[in-house]
Amino acid sequence: MQPRRVSFHTLGCKLNFSETSTLAREFERGGFVRVSPTAEADICVINSCSVTEHADKKCRNLIRRLHRRNPQAIIAVTGCYAQLKPEEIAAIGGVDIVLSNNDKGALYKRVVELSGKGRAQVYSCDTDSLTSFFAAFSSGDRTRAFLKVQDGCDYCCSYCTIHYARGASRNMPVADLVAEAREIAAAGQKEIVITGVNTGDFGRTTGERFIDLLRALNEVEGIERYRISSIEPNLLTDEIIAFCAASPKFQHHFHVPLQSGSDRILGLMRRRYTSARFAERIAAVRRLMPDAFIGIDVIVGFPGETEEDFRRTCDFLEGLAPSFLHIFPFSERPGTPAVDLPGKVQSSVATHRVEVLEALCDRLHGDFCRRACGTEDTVLFESTMRGGMMFGYTGNYRRVKAPYDRSRINTICRVALGEMDSSHDLIGEIRD
């Protein structure tokens, strides 16, 4: 008898990526064969996102596409969209199981107990049930692993549904996360990205601190690099900055959400800092790590954002000169306070503002990468090959390409950095 085939489809954040990988390992231990997302499968698992309306639409389209491809396949949907709008998903033809974020750990059991296709079964999708912690880390897919250290968020930003979809901030103990990091090291992966919904808020459950976790992970043998996936500016403390600057393992790479350079808009968003405080935190990083990669999230077209507010954001970003911008047009999410704010911004205006910031990002990222031309750095090469070249990243997240050499994959090499191409990739020459 042929083993049952299962495919996994991850939408949204790296937190979802780590959770999907953990679900896949459970199915594989149960005798299932994992197949690619485009292959025919007996079971299709979708880990959904709901950060924007586009994310919801993407999930709905994926469900329909999978059902058309194989009408007999069991389709199970979990994640944030499933948490927020379970009945909406259940009404889509082909869906068999809708599972909350809280019940994600029971997905394998729910699927194997299903006798066949029929009316969609919806499990515990009420917000009050979001109290458990689904431990997760990615494995086997790439050079780096994503380690989930925290879930949920106590910050109720006026535009965001994540605190409804993920519940309150909670975490596993440091000791348990160190054990998972050792498991990742034993599998041969060299880099861990520390991820969560509000990563820097780690410790709500156990009374520990985020810096305690960083210090403990720093001692794990076999892991040569750590990155903090994203951290709120008000949680990026001097202690964390100093630790990352001193540790050879923690990379000089910071992803810090800004959302707006206008203090008036930040107030409407219910963010916990001002633009001056944000700038001071970035300056604190650069004092100890002058060439750190600084990635920044920005939302444009928020209700009430005037041309003056947008110009203030542009000028603020010009002054900060970050390495990269992640730009999002505002997406109205039902049930959030932002829905009722006056001063809706036309979609055409928001689209134009995105284009302006994308041009700024292209210039800033090019400037950041170009500064490394003619220097040497260390690069961790990944398995991807395109046009006979392999790709990897420096510690501060400049992408480097060099002629493909299988023996160099998943190794950290000393590399001379040459010219930058039109994609901002640096041409590398391996020196060791």
Image (cartoon, rainbow, N blue to C red):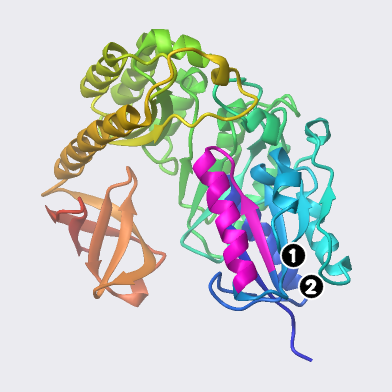
Per the rendering, the mark at residue 30 is 2
Give coordinates of residue 346: x percent, y percent. Answer: 37, 26
- x and y percentages locating residue 144 in the rendered image: 48, 56
| Vertical side of 353 occupied by 192: above or below | below
Dot 2 lies on which element? loop
Q: Secondary structure at mark 1?
A: helix
Residue extending furthest bottom? 1
> Is residue 51 within the magenta segment?
yes
Circles 1 and 2, Cβ within 8 Å, touching? The answer is yes
Residue 13 appears anywhere in the view: no
In the rendered structure, find residue 133 and report the number of the disc placed on it: none
- The answer to which quarter of the image holds residue 329 is top left
Q: Which residues are magenta?
A: 44-68
Vertical order, 209 against 405 (above or below): above
Q: Main secondary structure of the magenta part?
A: helix
Task: Give the residue at x 81% y 69%.
Answer: 117
Q: Nearer the viewer, residue 432 or 321?
A: 321
Q: Residue beneath label 1, please?
A: 26
Quadrant for the C terminus in the image: bottom left
